[in-house]
Image (cartoon, grey):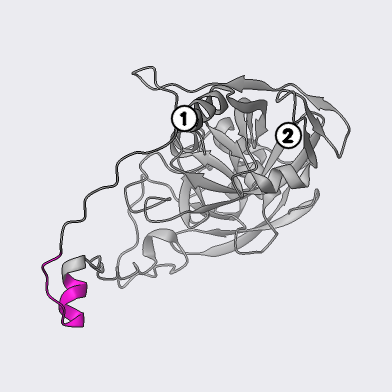
Amino acid sequence: MAQPGPSILNVHTPTSSFAIIYSDLEDNLQTLFDKLSKKTVAELNGRHVRSGWVKYEWNSTVWNLDDVSDYAIFAWRLKSATPEGDGWPVLFVRNPDLPLPSPPEYQNPSFYIFRPKPVAASPRLPETPESSSVASGKSKKRSKVPKPQETSPKFKKEFEKFHNENGVRTITGSIGPVNNVRMLLKSGYRHVYISRKFAIKNGFIPRDAAPGHYGYSGIVNLGKWPITVGRMRTVHSVYLTEESHFDVVLGRAFVERRQIKFDPVDPTDVVCGDTGEKIDCELVILKDGKGQIVTVT
């Protein structure tokens, strides 16, 4: 995690690379543009760096750095990253009105546009029961096994209905630069997760994230983000999830870090053991369009 004070930011343009000093305490979007302008006087023909000219790379994705909102997210990501580490942001500067250099002109290989594109691996077809039987020399014919009928006792169904209608615990807090977020608090999950819709809306992942990226092909770590509940702020690894019922899910990692204590009798009685403060908790019962209760496991 980055500490307050000066840090080094690497910068790449289509034809050069350099570094600047950045201070979380002293810099803002305008001072950052000023520093970049001084270093690119010759390349940009003396023009001042402005909105639309600066991007940065974070988590292997290139993001815009155009306005105050972009800068706020950029600053939070710097705070959650290790200086010069794998997750440390890298800046890119280019005047979009000027043409990109073309051979035999020099092209900076560190500039994101000139990086060699990775070769996509051929997708592996999923193994089917038919393909398995052929490989093992067995017949493709399989006897149809009748599905077992539901034989749950009536008292068990009533118990499950009662349990589900008790609802799930939700609390309010902030994650990164986003405040007043309703979060599911459930130790049955292992980590801290944010929904895809929430991640896109608040700039955690690009708006044009396509299927096959950012979680569709497996869970994705979005880096470390500060989470504030009550008086305490803690930093956690955050993962993308396809859970659509809640924007944020606080799992076992958060519960153990904050030493959360639950009252077995009153589910709304939630206490943070690290600070001793009681957190406002609301029970939420989810129902689908048909009025059926949705169980959050």
Residue lying at the far right in this picture: please name it: 276
- Give 208 or 42, whichever is nearer the viewer: 208
User: Mark 2 Cα within 10 Å, few/some/many (few <14, many 20+)?
Assistant: some
Q: Which residue is mark 2?
A: 228
Q: Amino acid at mark 1?
A: Lys
Comparing 125 with 93, the one in front is 125
CA distance for labels 2 and 1: 38 Å
Task: Please report the residue visible at 89 percent of the width from the left and 32 percent of the height from the top.
Answer: 276
Side (left or right) of 40 relative to 206: right
* Tag 2: amino acid: Thr
Circle count: 2
Q: Residue at x 67, y 40 (%)?
A: 31
Q: Say above or below: 58 vs 104.
A: above
Question: Which is in the foreground here, disc 2 or disc 1?
Answer: 1
Residue 64 x %, y %: 48, 42
Circle 1: is it few (<14), some (14-19), or many (20+) Cα within 10 Å? few
Q: Is residue 287 above or below residue 92?
A: above
Give the residue drawn at x 32%, y 47%.
210
Pinpoint residue 236: horizontal percent, then vertical percent. Answer: 68, 48
Quadrant where the image shows the N terminus: bottom right
129 vs 65, left or right, is left
119 or 292: which is nearer to us? Answer: 292
SS type, badge 1: helix
- Residue 260 location, x and y as percent? 77, 38
The quadrant holding residue 34 is: top right
* Residue range corresponding to the magenta coloring: 131-142
Sequence order check, earlier mark of 2 and 1: 1
Q: Position of residue 185 (x, y in %)?
A: 64, 34
Kindly indicate whether the residue at mark 1 contacts the one at mark 2 (C-beta within 8 angstroms). Answer: no
Q: Which residue is mark 1?
A: 157
Tell which of 275 and 88 is nearer to you: 275
